[in-house]
Image: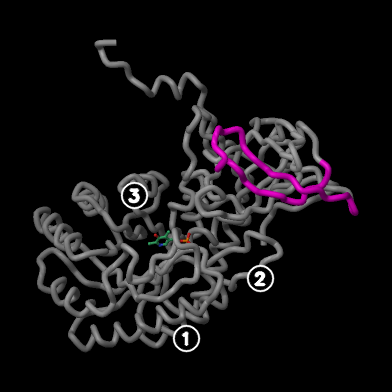
Amino acid sequence: MDHFIYQDGQLFAEDVPVAEIAAAVGTPFYVYSTATLVRHFRLFDEALAWGPHLVCYAMKAASNQAILKTLAAEGAGMDVVSGGEYARAKAAGVPGDRIVFSGVGKTRDEIRMVLEGGIRQLNVESEPEMRAISEVASSMGLTAPITVRVNPDVDAKTHAKIATGKSENKFGIPIARAGEVYAEAAALPGLKVIGIDVHIGSQLTQLEPFEQAYKKVADLTEALRADGHDISRLDLGGGLGIPYARSNEAPPLPMDYGALVQRTVGHLGCEIEIEPGRLIVGNAGLLVSDIIYVKNGEGRDFLILDAAMNDLIRPAMYEAHHEIVPVKEATAGAELTPYDIVGPVCESGDTFAKGRLMPPLQTGDLVAFRSAGAYGAVMASEYNTRPLIPEVLVHGDQFAVIRARPTFDEIINRDTIPEWL
Ligand SMILES: *Cc1c(COP(=O)(O)O)cnc(C)c1O
């Protein structure tokens, strides 16, 4: 559920007409709903209320300071995957003991940075990385709290580019080798093993892969405890999917996911961490665009938008489907015609949808991409020297620009000219 609904024939973001925001900030732009963000965070928090837990928002999905502050105020922790994200979380006021550091290639500088600033735990992805953490922590006279990310070799049944839990993926260590790796962790200086980490992929639309993975984690917890390791925390990753197409079968609800977690690992008495990103922010954001031209081609018609693949890469990168709706509500019974919906970038990949059935639309009409909050603004680029588009946050009847559109000069002046030119 989100807070982008039609009222009196036009699309609203909470209590603000989307068209009013467009008039104020210009198109294209991203707009997020505070109420939706908070609602989704609370669904997870409540789903795990049966025991000690921390919901660590995977901030790579959308990392604007205002979004982080909104969630942190609700009690969210943060899952970060780079030194930059760690700095962002800290800048938003999140204390180190609520920040988890994930990611396959943590550099020594990043490790030093988070140990200095304080960290809840580092999720170790490989033995070389574990040794690096041990060395850096020892050299600083500190002890790094760690979990080891295990790869449970389950099929997440999601897009290949966002599946992470099969043995051929680059993530984690094979679960069969966990015993040796934990033994080495216990022997290394500067490390304190506190638990196990697993994350099998993103946009999962079924619970069954989670169930398989978490059962393996439960067995591993018992085996590691029998070997004398103190396993008191389980980080179960993120990955719960969202409905991108209204026609699709609805993905599982956080409440059912929480019940599955309780059923599979609840008996172990561990503190539970989860790292949802997409489900918290995905449906909390729209990308709003203007129609520059309606072009009638040979056998197909095009809607040419002022948003492009550099603003929202998901369709080009993951063949992702986004619902695209008119900001002015179509009249009941309006005739639908197929359009290819494209951006102005000089690549055929700059196509958002092919043959999409749309109501009558004209140059100057606004359209909104639904479910664009996650992996939207954060993956944008300035390809074609198209400025990064503004982000706007709505709260009830208020809205604020939370990242402004840069001017052309600001973009150009980031380049520096060598003295010989
Ligand atoms: C990307 C990622 C997540 C979040 O995945 P979502 O599908 O957005 O919930 C969580 N944990 C790790 C380690 C990740 O890489």
Mark 3 close to ligand 1, CB under 8 Å: no
Q: Which residue is rendered at x = 60% and y = 47% of the image?
A: 32
Which disc number belongs to residue 249?
Answer: 2
Callout 3 environment at 10 Å: few (<14), some (14 to 19), or many (20+)? many
> Alpha-carbon distance for marks 3 and 2?
36 Å
> Alpha-carbon distance for marks 2 and 1?
24 Å
Q: Are marks 3 and 2 in contact (CB under 8 Å)?
A: no
Q: Position of residue 413 (x, y in %)?
A: 40, 20
Q: Which residue is mark 3?
A: 86
Disc number lying in front (2 or 1): 2
Kind of residue sitting beneath label 2? Glu
Relative to 237, say whether 360 is above or below: above
Q: Which residue is rendered at x = 63% and y = 63% of the image?
A: 243
Dividing the image into four equal quarters, which quarter contains ligand 1? bottom left
Q: Mark 3 or 2 closer to N-term?
A: 3
Q: Which residue is mark 1?
A: 263
> Alpha-carbon distance for marks 1 and 3?
33 Å
Q: Which residue is rendered at x = 71% and y = 38% of the image?
A: 303
Q: Which segment is the magenta one?
A: 332-360
Relative to 88, say whether 134 is above or below: below
